[in-house]
Amino acid sequence: MTKVYVGMSGGVDSSLTAALLAEQGYDVTGVYMKNWTQDLPGMRCPWADDLADAKRVAVQLGIDFKVFDFENEYRHKVVDYMIEEYKLGRTPNPDIMCNQEVKFKIFLEAALEDGADMIATGHYARVKDGQLLQAADSNKDQTYFLYRVTKEALEKTLFPLGEFKKPQVREMASERGLFTAGKKDSQGICFVGQIGIREFLTQYVEQKAGPIIDKQTGKVLGQHDGAIFYTIGQRHGLDVGGGLPYYVVGKDMDTNEVYVTTNLNDDSLWKPELVLTNLHWINEAPAGGQFQIRVRHRAPLVNATLTYAENGDVLFHLENPERAVAPGQSIVIYKDEQCLGGGILS
């Protein structure tokens, strides 16, 4: 019998994942990954509640249950990475790093070492012959977050929810009487929960006031409390009211200046070409040609032409310019329903 360790977060998706695999005859063990337990000002970390929910479902299903403590690795690989990227003025995605470094690396290795044959998670994605395919529910598809996972890891992974739509998942969980069937989906960053990124970063970086400058006129419009907190295309939180809305079009981390404009057609807001570094291909690297890319989770796929620079960077020429993409963002590459990989916007 194939032994599968299911990453159980205490939510409905991973609960149903465990239930389906048990029904399909797998030898299932539920595993709660203890990644983050720190409370933040104004927000209690819900990890203990999530652990209790996951354990309760495991008891309901009659499966073994374990806790793997990855808090030190998580802080180093995911949280420190995110903070350093923001300090450089970039816009990272910690969920992608969590999948790359924790769920499909450290967890996979620990599970195999503990006797598992495979792992499973509640992600909305599909795997076929070591290829990562989009989920049947395009609205919930999570391949954007999984593009840095290796082919070897995917060959040891099951995604039972890849064929279902979210309402079906809740219905199936409810039919099985799962305790978590009606539990709300977690929002926000994987470890920050309901708190905003600004509130999180203020615990780790110094707030330093600086000027907000109109890019067109050079006039100082107001003050900000740290260029680190702003990203390209941002409109809210600028507090330079009156007249047309202002949008962030650039920032200088050395001088702590934020540049804004009311011109929605400003070249800084629109990118006809994207240069990607730190490339990761799940399978073999494709030759140049026509592909589709996604610039953020749930953004529509857009047509783009891939060419390679001499240094190995990937250049995408977009069919239509893309608005408000920021350095540090992940750009994920698709061919039909297959997720090929992606890179970081330079």
Image (spheres, rainbow, N blue to C red):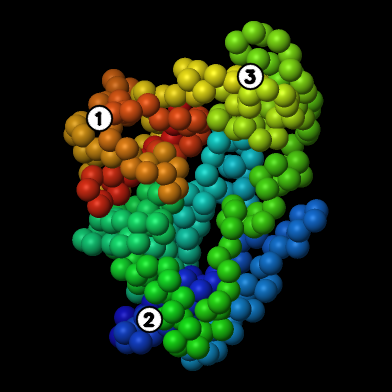
Question: Is residue 18 visible from the viewing direction of this image?
Answer: no
Dot label at residue 305: 1
Q: In which quarter of the image is the N terminus?
A: bottom left
Query: Which of the marked residues, 2 or 3, is nearer the chain's N terminus?
Result: 2
- Residue 163, given in percent of the width and then of the height, sits at 31, 68
Residue at position x 60%, y 10% from top?
216
Of marks 1 and 3, which one's residue comes earlier in the chain? 3
Drawn side of residue 66 relative to residue 278, left or right: right
Q: What is the residue that sits farthest to the top in this orientation?
A: 217
Look at 50% across and 88% down and name the residue there: 177
Q: In which quarter of the image is the C terminus?
A: top left
**Residue at the location (25% across, 56% down)?**
131
**Picture layout, residue 105 above or below residue 232:** below
Secondary element at tag 1: strand
- How far apart are the alpha carbons under marks 2 and 3? 51 Å
Q: Mark 3 is on which residue type? A: Tyr
On residue 258, the disc is none
Give the percent coordinates (x, y) of residue 148. 39, 48
Task: Name which residue lies at 19% across and 32% down.
Answer: 289
Q: What element carries label 3?
A: strand
Residue on which disc 2 sits: 20
Q: Nearer the viewer, mark 1 or mark 3?
A: 3
Numbered tag placed on residue 259 in the rendering:
3
Q: How far apart are marks 1 and 3 (CA)?
A: 30 Å
Is residue 180 visible to us here?
A: yes
* Image position of 337 (left or right of 343): left
